Image (tube, rainbow, N blue to C red):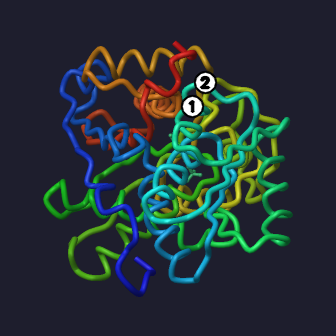
């Protein structure tokens, strides 16, 4: 991780379970299926605790007194929680129409929450302007490179938990596309260090049909990501103008993967399928990933005689409205 001293937070984040899901594999009619389960990440139940651990540690090194973020919910929850014990003032900016639990799970920490009448892309633009006028560390704006590196741990752990090897196929939900690029980078670093002997993983991107700019570009065989106006129940991944979209798309193409989207109905079915077969209650983003995996197997794009790792990135208790 790109920090020089001791981390100031996140010591308990990460190292979430990688579990084999036999009943799910049977339901999907595929040989083997693993869930990398960040729905139980500590302390705020999403993969965002990984990125915030690095971002706030770096913010402390840089001497920032205030941390902030533009968020679709989970990042705000995590920045809020970690800021409390690592000694920062905290401002989080979110679209006004998030799920109740995502709002409450920031407010409970007593931070400043700004609800913006607009979608995430508008919140993000506002934050870019604020970052130019206030000496604040916006974890996903002005210190974004450090934040992004935190996602590599998701890839490191998958390799370690598989017994130091890379999976054959991995399905990852994409909002900004950052997580996709950093799982790739994490596995690549392990490969370059000789910790895994082979790296031939195919990367698959999962998005909701109501916000699928990366999937659209993939299907149009274009390297330009056209922004969209999000309209989906999968609010945590509803980014219409994804910052790392082109890079995520490149990884899908060069690894021989694919990008696919599913409807809101399919998202809910995905949430239920994972709950009923593995006893894991994921949020809407997880429903997207499960449903896209199902679709890719049915289309023959992920072969039935192979294994697949499904990236579960958030917790269902935070998006109860959806179901
Ligand atoms: C933020 C988030 C993602 C994806 O984030 P990227 O911006 O693509 O890195 C996926 N799932 C959940 C639950 C999230 O909160």
Please give the residue where the numbered disc 2 appears in the rendered image.
100
x, y percentage for residue 62? 58, 83
* Helix, strand or loop under label 1: helix
Mark 1 CB in 8 Å range of ligand 1?
no
Displayed quadrant of residue 95: top right
Displayed quadrant of residue 220: top right
Is any atom of residue 184 visible in this view? no
Task: Name the residue at 47% across, 64% down.
Answer: 182
Q: Are marks 1 and 2 in contact (CB under 8 Å)?
A: yes
In the drawing, does residue 129 fall left or right of residue 15?
A: right
Q: Residue furthest left?
A: 163
x, y percentage for residue 262? 59, 26
Which of the two marks, 1 or 2, is nearer to us in this view? 1
Quick check: 240 above or below 8? Answer: above
Task: Name the residue at 51% across, 68% down.
Answer: 56
What's the mark number on residue 104?
1
x, y percentage for residue 213? 72, 44
Quick check: 219 above or below 64? Answer: above
State the CA–CA distance, disc 1 to disc 2: 6 Å
Is any atom of residue 313 visible in this view? yes
Comparing 132 with 313, the one in front is: 132
Comparing 200 with 4, the one in front is: 4
């Amino acid at each position: 991780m790109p920090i020089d001293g001791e981390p100031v937070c996140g010591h308990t984040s990460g190292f979430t379970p990688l579990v084999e899901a036999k009943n799910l594999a049977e339901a999907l009619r595929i040989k083997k299926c693993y869930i990398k389960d960040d729905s139980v990440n500590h302390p705020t139940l999403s993969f965002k605790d990984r990125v915030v651990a690095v971002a706030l540690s770096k913010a402390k090194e840089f001497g920032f007194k205030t941390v902030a973020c533009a968020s679709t919910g989970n990042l705000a929850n995590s920045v809020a929680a970690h800021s409390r014990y690592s000694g920062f003032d905290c401002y989080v900016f979110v679209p006004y129409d998030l799920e109740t639990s995502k709002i409450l799970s920031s407010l409970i920490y007593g931070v400043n929450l700004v609800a913006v009448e607009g979608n995430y892309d508008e919140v993000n633009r506002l934050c870019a302007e604020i970052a130019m006028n206030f000496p604040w560390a916006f974890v996903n704006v002005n210190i974004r490179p450090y934040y992004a590196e935190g996602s590599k741990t998701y890839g490191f752990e998958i390799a370690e938990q598989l017994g130091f090897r890379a999976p054959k196929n991995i399905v990852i939900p994409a909002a900004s596309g950052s997580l996709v690029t950093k799982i790739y980078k994490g596995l690549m670093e392990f490969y370059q260090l000789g910790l895994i002997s082979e790296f031939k993983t195919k990367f698959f991107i999962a998005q909701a049909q109501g916000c699928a700019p990366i999937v659209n570009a993939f299907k149009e065989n274009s390297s330009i990501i056209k922004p969209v106006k999000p309209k989906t129940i999968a609010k945590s991944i509803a980014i219409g103008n994804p910052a790392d979209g082109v890079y995520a798309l490149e990884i899908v193409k060069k690894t021989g993967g694919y990008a696919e989207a599913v409807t809101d109905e399919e998202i809910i079915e995905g949430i239920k399928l994972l709950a009923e077969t593995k006893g894991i209650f994921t949020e809407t983003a997880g429903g997207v990933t499960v449903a896209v995996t199902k679709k890719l197997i049915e289309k023959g794009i992920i072969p039935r005689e192979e294994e697949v790792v499904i990236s579960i990135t958030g917790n269902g208790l935070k998006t109860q409205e959806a179901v």
